[in-house]
Image: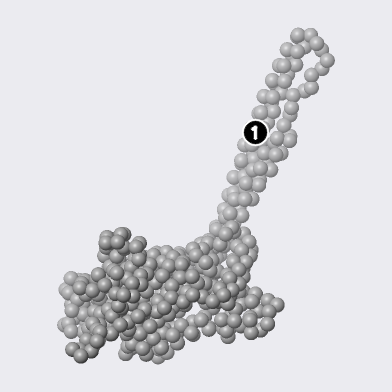
C-alpha cells in the first residue's frame, strides 16, 4: 500500500539514531552522512527459517507459543523473489520495487503486541506481500475475519499468488485451521466514514502522521488493539471506552510515512471500501467441520501415543503444529515417578498384609486372665507397629535406591540425546525441532469412503 522502506529498528549511538531519523525515504534514498543503521539487524542471521525463529526467541522478540508456531509454519523465504532467497533469514528489511517485507524483529513485536486469539477480526493497512496476514490467519481460525488493504494492485496479485502457493503446497496448511485473508486495492486514508466498519485488531505498516491518528482509532472496536508507527515509535493503542484510549510505546522505529491521497480541484475524493464480510456456505462449513473432527481425532490419538493428556494448544488446530511443550525427556521422568509411586504403594500393601495381629483370646473368664490378654494384645500391637515402621523405612530406602538408579539412567540417556542433538542444541537449550512426519490429516481424508471429487474438495485441491 505504501512506498515504504519498512520497519527500521533503532539502536547504536544517539548520533546514529539521529542519522537514522533522517533515514530511509519513500524513494529509497538515504539522505544522511551515516550509513543506514539496523534495517532490522537486532538478531543474528539464521541458516533456515527455524534457526531465525530460534534467534528471535533467544533475543525475546518472540515470547508466546502461539506467535512462535505461526512464524515456524510459514517460511519467510517463500515470500522473496527466487534470486533474493539467500537473504530471507537475515533480520533485515527487504525491498524490490513495490514489494517489501519488514525485518523479522519488527514483525515479531507486531504479532506479540496484537495479542491475537481465534475468532477475532483483523485489518492490515498496507498488507503488501500478505506474509503478515497469512501468519495472522493461522491464529484467527476459520471463524475469524482477515482483511487487508493495499495501494498497489500488482502487489495484491503477488500476495494472492503467494497465498495460493501456501494453500496448495505447504504442509503447515493442514496443521492449522486457517482464516484466509482477503485483499482490496485502495488507500487506507480514503476509507469512508460511512463505512462504519470496526475491527478487533488493526495494524498499519507505514508511519502515521499525528493528524491521521484519530482516523486509525475509529477503525477499532471497543476493547480492540491498534498497532502502528506513530512519531517514530511502534505504538500499541487499546480502546478502553467509546472515547478513551490506552497508549503504550513499544520500540523506536523508522517507517516511511503514509502516502497521502491526491485530490485535484476537479476530482472528487476517492472511496476505498473495505473487503466485504462473507457468510460461509453450508458446503464450506461442512468442510471445516469434517477437517476439524479428523484433526481433533488425530490430536487425541497422538496425545495417547505420547502418554500425555490433552495436547498443548491454544486455539483450534495448533496442537498438531509440531511443537509440543514437553519433549521425550519430560515423558521419561513422569514414567519414573509413576514407577516409584507404584513401589511405595506395593510396599505399603506388603507391610499391611504382613503385620502381626494380636493373639485371639482364650476362654478364661477370670479378671486376671482378661488383664493378661489385654497386656498381650497391647504388646502385640506395639510389635506390629514397630514392624510396620521398620518395613516402611526399608521401603523408603528401597524407593530411594530405585530413584537414584533411575536418575542415573535418566542422566545417561539425556547425555546421549544431547550428543546426538549436536553442539547447537547444547548451546541454545531449545527443544528438539520436530522431524518431518506423514500428513496424517491428508491420509485420513484419502481413506474416507467418499467419491474422489469430494475428497479433493476436503483437501482444498492440494496436490501434496
Q: Residue at (57%, 84%) from the top-left corner? A: 461
Q: Quadrant of residue 147?
A: bottom left
Give the structural element (helix, strand or loop) at label 1: helix
Q: Residue at x 35, y 62 (%)?
A: 223
Q: Looking at the image, which residue is at 62% across and 70% down?
A: 294
Measured as percent of width and height from the top left, residue 338 is found at 62, 50
Residue 114 drawn at (x, y percent): 37, 67
Q: Position of residue 230 (x, y in %)?
A: 24, 71
Residue located 17% across and 82% down the image: 32
- Classify 335 as above or below 350: below
For disc 1, the marked residue is 390
* Residue at the far right in the pictured view: 363
For residue 203, say whether it is visible: no
Question: In this view of the protein, which residue sits in the foreground, 71 or 203?
Answer: 203
Looking at the picture, does residue 165 appear above or below residue 357?
Answer: below
Look at the image and tell me whether residue 211 can be seen: yes
Q: Specify whether 89 is left or right of 344.
A: left
Nearest the eye: 29 or 133 = 133
Work out which quarter of the rendered image holds the C terminus and state it.
bottom right
Quadrant location of residue 329?
A: bottom right
Q: Position of residue 319 (x, y in %)?
A: 54, 66
430 vs 365: above or below: below
Q: Quadrant of the N terminus?
A: bottom left
Q: Looking at the image, which is closer to me, 146 or 3? A: 146
Which of these two is toward me, 417 or 251?
Answer: 251
Amino acid at each position: 500500500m505504501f512506498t515504504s522502506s519498512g520497519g527500521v529498528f533503532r539502536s547504536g549511538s544517539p548520533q546514529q539514531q539521529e542519522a537514522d531519523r533522517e533515514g530511509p525515504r519513500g524513494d529509497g534514498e538515504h539522505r544522511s552522512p551515516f550509513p543506514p543503521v539496523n534495517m532490522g539487524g537486532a538478531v543474528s542471521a539464521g541458516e533456515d527459517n527455524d534457526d531465525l525463529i530460534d534467534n528471535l526467541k533467544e533475543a525475546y522478540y518472540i515470547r508466546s507459543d502461539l506467535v512462535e508456531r505461526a512464524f515456524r509454519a510459514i517460511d519467510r523465504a517463500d515470500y522473496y523473489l527466487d534470486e533474493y532467497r539467500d537473504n530471507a533469514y537475515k533480520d533485515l528489511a527487504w525491498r524490490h520495487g513495490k514489494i517489501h517485507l519488514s525485518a523479522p524483529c519488527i514483525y515479531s513485536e507486531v504479532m506479540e503486541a496484537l495479542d491475537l486469539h481465534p475468532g477475532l477480526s483483523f485489518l492490515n493497512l498496507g498488507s503488501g506481500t500478505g506474509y503478515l496476514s497469512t501468519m495472522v490467519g493461522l491464529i484467527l481460525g476459520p471463524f475469524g475475519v482477515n482483511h487487508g488493504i493495499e495501494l498497489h494492485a500488482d502487489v495484491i496479485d503477488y500476495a494472492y499468488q503467494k497465498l495460493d502457493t501456501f494453500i496448495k503446497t505447504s504442509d503447515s496448511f493442514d496443521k492449522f485451521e486457517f482464516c484466509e485473508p482477503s485483499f482490496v486495492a485502495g488507500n487506507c486514508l480514503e476509507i469512508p466514514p460511512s463505512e462504519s466498519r470496526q475491527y478487533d485488531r488493526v495494524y498499519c505498516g507505514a508511519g502515521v502522521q499525528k493528524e491521521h491518528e484519530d482516523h486509525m482509532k475509529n477503525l477499532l472496536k471497543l476493547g480492540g488493539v491498534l498497532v502502528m508507527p506513530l512519531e517514530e515509535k511502534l505504538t500499541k493503542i487499546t480502546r478502553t471506552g467509546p472515547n478513551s484510549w490506552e497508549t503504550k510505546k513499544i520500540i523506536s522505529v523508522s517507517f516511511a510515512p503514509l502516502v497521502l491521497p491526491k485530490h485535484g480541484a476537479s476530482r472528487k475524493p476517492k472511496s476505498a471500501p473495505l473487503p466485504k464480510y462473507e457468510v460461509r456456505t453450508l458446503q464450506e462449513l461442512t468442510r471445516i467441520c469434517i477437517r476439524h473432527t479428523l484433526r481433533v481425532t488425530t490430536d487425541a490419538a497422538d496425545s495417547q501415543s505420547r502418554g500425555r493428556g490433552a495436547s498443548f494448544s491454544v486455539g483450534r488446530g495448533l496442537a498438531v503444529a509440531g511443537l509440543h511443550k514437553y519433549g521425550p525427556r519430560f515423558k521419561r521422568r513422569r514414567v519414573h515417578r509413576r514407577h516409584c509411586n507404584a513401589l511405595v504403594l506395593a510396599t505399603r500393601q506388603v507391610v499391611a498384609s504382613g503385620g502381626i495381629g494380636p493373639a485371639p483370646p482364650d476362654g478364661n473368664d477370670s479378671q486376671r486372665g482378661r488383664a493378661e490378654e489385654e497386656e498381650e494384645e497391647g504388646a502385640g500391637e506395639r510389635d506390629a507397629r514397630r514392624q510396620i515402621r521398620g518395613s516402611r523405612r526399608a521401603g523408603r530406602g528401597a524407593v530411594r535406591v530405585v530413584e537414584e538408579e533411575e536418575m542415573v539412567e535418566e542422566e545417561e540417556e539425556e547425555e546421549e540425546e544431547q550428543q546426538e542433538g549436536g553442539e547447537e542444541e547444547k548451546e541454545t537449550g531449545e527443544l528438539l525441532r520436530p522431524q518431518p512426519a506423514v500428513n496424517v490429516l491428508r491420509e485420513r481424508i484419502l481413506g474416507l469412503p467418499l467419491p474422489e471429487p469430494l475428497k479433493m474438495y476436503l483437501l482444498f485441491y492440494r496436490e501434496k
